[in-house]
Image (cartoon, rainbow, N blue to C red):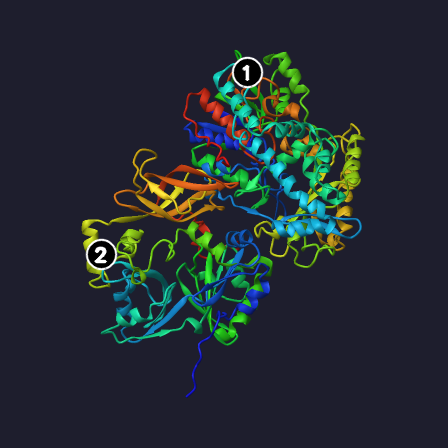
Amino acid sequence: MKTYDAIIVGAGHNGLTTAAFLAKAGLDVVCVEKNDYIGGAAVSRNLYENWMYSNCSYVCSLLRPEIYRSLELHKHGLQVTPYGGSVTFMENGDYFGSYHDPEVAYREMARFSRHDADSYERYSADTMRQCRFIRDFLLRTPPDPTSFKLNDIKELIAIGNKFLEMGQDRMYETIRFWTMSVAEYLDEYFETDVIKAARSGSGIIGTALGIHSPGTAYVLLHHYMGDVDGNVGTWGFARGGMGAVSNSIAGAFQAYGGELRTEAGVDQIIVKKGKATGVALENGEEIEGRIVVSAMDVKRTFLKCMNKSDLPESFYNRVENFKIRGSSGKLNIALDGMPTFPALPEGSSLYISDMHFIDSMERMERAYDDWKDGTWSKDPYVDMTIPTAVDPTMAPPGKHFMSCFIQYCPHKLEGRDWTDPEREEFAKTVIEQIANYSPDFKELILHYEIRTPQDIEDQIGITEGNIFHGELTMDQLLFNRPVPGYAQYRAPVAGLYMCGSSVHPGGGVMAAPGANAAREILADLKRPSTVPENFGDD
Amino acid sequence: MTIQEVHQGRLRTPFFSRISALDTVNQWHEWKGYSSADTLYCEDTEYFAIRNATAVFDLTPMTKYRITGPETAAYINRLVTRDMDKIKPGRVAYAVWCDDRGQVIDDGTIFHLKEGEYRLCSQERHFAWLQAAAIGFDVSIKEETADIAALAVQGPTSFSVLSKMGLDGLAELKPFGLMNFDFDGADLMVSRTGFTGDLGYELWIEPAKAELLWDALFEAGKLHGIRAMGTHALELARIEAGYLAAYHDFLPADATVRTGRTRSPLELGLDWLVDFKKPNFNGRRALAEEKRRGSTWRLVKLDIEGNKAAHHSYIFAKEKGNKSEIGFVTSAAWSPVCKQNIAIGTVRTPHGKVGSTVWVEIYYQREMHWARAMAKATVFDKPFWFPPRRSATPPGPY
């Protein structure tokens, strides 16, 4: 029986990234995927006639340009097209838009408050300062503060120096920033409710927290630190849908000689004499590997695909308590034409933007209240995009694909499974909310796909359908991610590694966890690294 | 007598009414006397229209000559360095032409319109030189820049747009081919050419029909993401495609004062355009001599580490130690579509062989302070961006 150098479990974008960098280093790598398609949550699916659906993740910004470049993803078909801004429709018939052009953005804010328009510059600089602090660590392995290994000490000193560099006031600011709520953070700069509401959304996306919950300011940062071609904070559409990201990484992986196997779900990671030696597939087949790398979230990896007896008790308990709560759903819609939004001027650039339909901080928090009550938000925070307003490849000319990300939506309804009528009710909630601002929207709907967190878990495998493979709160970030002592991509079992979004730097279509894991694995194997370093901004 | 007064101020192309109607940023420059837009609404959006949908560029100010007469083919073949006998009617060729010292005067495209009839299209004006080179040939040369309105229609959906406009048979048109269509009773020439390195076409029509053509094009393109673009977006696409630009990557030999500032085609990586099998062409003797003795300069395409664009950078052979530079960057950009830090430069031979490593000194500013980086670069000889759709025939819908 053949023994691979490495078996990667899960062909999502992180699994594929690890696979590609290991194959690039000359290893004999197989990547196994349970579904009959690859991509995990970065996927394009043909679910209706000639429409392609980005039916899970839907926009691209965090994908590290270093990885894009190093794997030559453009040669494997990836193209990311940036798009305009965002718009929040208001109950009074008005709207608040964000624009790419800073002067237009200024005038729009000044329409509501000159104070807020002026304050934006300071907000932007303060947020960028935090971004700069964290961005450098995205493509680095977090140091273990309790180890006295040279690399860890060096890394800690680097972080410390970066921190000290900020100066006293800003060090205080930073410590506050990491623990405060997005609502408090925004209160320090803005007075207009709709402006705060529009900006607060980024603080809760994918997170089972409300805008007033501590730690959500950081989540805002997580959505702000991406960039498209150096334009920090810009978001883009992957041409052909988010599957283009995974497909291009898979293309690179195969070009380096890697082997991809679909419909090969892993039932068990095999451990012999304290070392991972391969995987047993659901169909009973066994594959041998010198190392096994799991791109699955930590709960699925350790609680479902391993024997408890192979793991240290404390580790097992930590994983059990890892926060990975389902908080968001999706509604993916095929449209017969572009819906009109009468509030917007004709031809407005905001038709190519993220659209939102909650205009106050109170409504944002109330949406969270529903989730705490065990049900979906009756007035949800929807992050809606129409990628086909830019992308000619995902629907026939003149037709459109609409992606609605919906916050909040629980994994279980009041603790029990969703029923089909409830799923339909959930969809209806979203459709009605959008229809309030677009009278022709409903009649344009040709087909839709509902995805509750439970659906996402069932189809993709992410525990509770949490888009980040675990929440991005301070207790689960950096050297605490996924659990203290195991942040350097190595599992407690020899030969077993973690490369999914449960590890640093976390979720989003970033590919950084996958790249960082590959670098650590290659170091263990005493091979030269194929993983690029951070470009750096300075 | 009637005096035909010269036009004061900037000229307007026949598309001006349409372009200015789309303009929101009021950012124009002069191009050979004409008003030409830098950008119309947003450079990024315009650039991505080239790479993702369809972008339309007004290239009317491009200098155009019609060359006719019984000896035109022989004249053209004598004029440029490449073998033009291979360029049959209905085909287009990229070409360079040199002075007697084998130094490049300009580059451009030559359209073999029909037997014995050519159009030469270039950045600079060459009427006097074209006439001087015509001695002994029975040809007639006519400047026709203002007589032809021209649009570049570039991008992955450009074929869909033009098909929807009713240009039947376009599917068969190969790269560097041209076809003629009837458009509202006028002749519309379409060539599969462009300056973007992507799927794309150029449209040529009499000025009286220009606005009608624009309207038809934008109507047809409505559902295919059509957008107008300015020169800034085009310039970025041009560098990604690895195309040279006069006054950036070389200087027209006849307008250059200082010795050693001009370049030969061999020094511009255009060896493939020089056919020594031809008995005669302008600059042949000098180029043959250069080939024998070796060139002084070499054009390099650079893939540079990091993400800071290497504008105006010196190029060095080594990172440290050797103080003297071996050349400099002439065009540079961060390529959004390749996610590569790319540049075109010129270095002294024997440096800059394909696959070799050079070092680029990059100065960049961050919040007032300047910083300097020595970035490693690999020499490349292919276009940075060359998607399969560029040469696919028939082209796909996107």
**Residues beneath discs 1 and 2 located on the same chain:** no
Residues B201 and B182: in front is: B201
- Name the secondary structure under disc 2: helix
Q: Which mark is residue B287?
A: 2
Q: Are marks 1 and 2 in contact (CB under 8 Å)?
A: no
Instruction: Judge from the rendering whether residue B75 lies leftward or rightward of residue A162; answer left or right.
Output: left
Q: Which mark is residue B211?
A: none
Q: Residue at x 68, y 47 (%)?
A: A117
Q: Quadrant of residue B72?
A: bottom left
Q: Amino acid at mark 1?
A: Val
Q: CA distance from mark 1 to mark 2?
A: 68 Å
Tell me residue B120's x, y (percent).
Answer: 36, 67
Residue at image mark 1: A493
Figure check: A412 above or below B378:
above
Q: Amino acid at mark 2?
A: Leu
Q: Quadrant of the N terminus of chain A?
A: top left
The answer to whether one can see residue A168 in this image is yes
Chain on which label 2 sits: B
Q: Residue at x 31, y 71 (%)?
A: B128
Q: What is the total number of numbered labels drawn onto the structure image?
A: 2
Residues A147 and B385: in front is: A147
Tell me residue B378's x, y (percent).
Answer: 36, 40
Tell me residue B167's x, y (percent).
Answer: 50, 66
Q: Residue furthest bottom?
A: B1
